[in-house]
Amino acid sequence: SLLAAVLGVIWLPSAGARETTFSWELIEGATSYEIQIGKSQLFKKKVAEQKTTDVRWTIDLPIGRYFYRVRGIDAENQPGIWSEAVAV
């Protein structure tokens, strides 16, 4: 199974929102990644969700507190385990 990602984040504030770039390390065996952004660590109310082949993703978010997590997806479209949720 795929290992969890190591996460990082940078953001650029603007009026009422901020451009936020989420990044993570390559996961051995992953051909794509899924990222979820939520208002809580439980991700019951997701703000955004995206699949990407890159190890970074940028989105404009209203100013506030969010959590995000990432998991790898292998060549057979099988997802790995989610990373720990990180607060931003």
Image: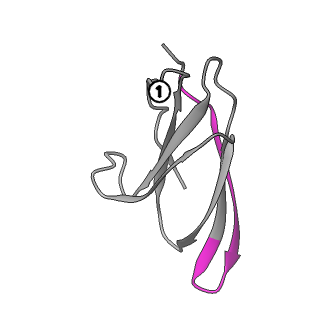
Closer-to-camera residue (34/16):
34
Q: Quadrant of residue 24?
A: top right
| Direction left: furthest residue | 44
Identified at 27% across, 51% down, the residue is: 44
As drawn, which residue projects farthest toward the bottom? 15
The reply to whether the magenta stretch includes residue 27 is no
Q: Residue visible at 69% across and 28% down?
A: 26
User: Main SS of the magenta segment?
Assistant: strand
- Magenta extent: 4-18
Residue depicted at 68% across the width and 74% down the height: 13
Looking at the rendered image, the quarter that the C terminus falls into is: bottom right
Residue 66 position, x and y percent, is 46, 58
> Badge 1, how many Cα within 10 Å: few under 14, some, many 20+?
few
Please tell me which residue lies in front, 29 or 39. Answer: 29
Q: Is 78 situated left or right of 10 in this image?
A: left
Residue 82: x, y in percent? 45, 31
Whether residue 30 sits left or right of residue 40 in the image: it is: right
Per the image, the residue denoted by label 1 is 77
- From the top left corner, tell me how far across and down residue 18 is, in percent: 63, 73
User: Residue 20 placed where, x, y %?
Assistant: 64, 62
Residue 12 falls inside the magenta stretch: yes
Amino acid beneath label 1: Asn
Residue placed furthest toward the top: 1
